[in-house]
Every structure is written in C-alpha cells, then in structure tokens.
Image (cartoon, helix red, strand yellow):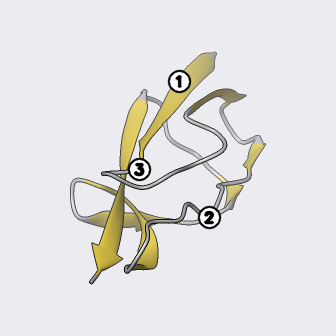
C-alpha cells in the first residue's frame, strides 16, 4: 500500500513538501532552513521522525520544529 508523507516547514523553506512511500520503504527527509532559527527535526503528534525505513500504515503530516 502507498502512503502519503507531507511536510510543513512552519515558515521555513524545504525543497520537498510531499512524498509517497510504500510500507517498509526507505524515506529520506530534507533539512529545511529558516532565517534566524535552528531546525531540530520533523514531528508528527510530538513524535520525532528521521530518515530511514518507515513502517507506518497511515498517511503522515510532518511539521518542522525550530529553536529561535
């Protein structure tokens, strides 16, 4: 099954905003930029996501978190 992973940079700039992955396929997350802020990661419901093999059986909307 194919799942959608959307990314919201929360005011920052990201080269990739959405991807589709199959269960167990490797996902590579971009590193967004936001002037005057430090990117600390991609989050979904307070769970940090990183690049690698994802085993989620649902669509995921990731939000960038920043430290000013």
Q: Residue at x 41, y 36 (%)?
A: 60
Mark earlier in primary sequence (2, 3): 3
Q: CA distance from mark 1 to mark 2?
A: 19 Å
Q: Residue at x 70, y 27 (%)?
A: 22
Label 3 crowd (10 A; few <14 / some 14-19 / many >=20): many
Compared to residue 48, the image places residue 1 above or below, namely: above
Relative horizontal placement of residue 26, taking residue 46 as reference (left or right): right
From the image, tell me which residue sits under label 1: 4
Compared to residue 26, the image places residue 22 above or below, namely: above
From the image, tell me which residue sits under label 3: 9
Label 1 crowd (10 A; few <14 / some 14-19 / many >=20): some
Find residue 62 and report its horizontal and vertical position in percent. Answer: 39, 46
Q: Residue at x 51, y 51 (%)?
A: 13
Number of numbered discs overlaid on the protein picture: 3
Relative horizontal placement of residue 31, taking residue 9 as reference (left or right): right
Q: Quadrant of residue 67?
A: bottom left
Q: Secondary structure at mark 3?
A: loop
Q: CA distance from mark 3 to mark 1?
A: 16 Å
Mark earlier in primary sequence (3, 1): 1
Compared to residue 34, the image places residue 58 above or below, namely: above
Evaluate if marks 2 and 3 touch, with contact meaning CB atoms under 8 Å apart: no
Find residue 49 and report its horizontal and vertical position in percent. Answer: 48, 62
Q: Secondary structure at mark 1?
A: strand
Q: Nearer the viewer, mark 3 or mark 1?
A: 3
From the image, tell me which residue sits under label 2: 31
Q: Secondary structure at mark 2?
A: loop
Evaluate if marks 3 and 1 touch, with contact meaning CB atoms under 8 Å apart: no
Compared to residue 51, the image places residue 61 above or below, namely: above
């Amino acid at each position: 099954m194919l799942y959608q992973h959307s990314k919201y940079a929360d005011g920052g700039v990201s080269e990739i905003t959405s991807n589709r992955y199959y269960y167990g396929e490797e996902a590579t997350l971009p590193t967004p930029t936001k002037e005057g802020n430090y990117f600390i990661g991609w989050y979904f419901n307070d769970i940090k996501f990183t690049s690698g093999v994802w085993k989620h059986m649902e669509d995921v909307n990731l939000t960038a978190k920043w430290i000013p």
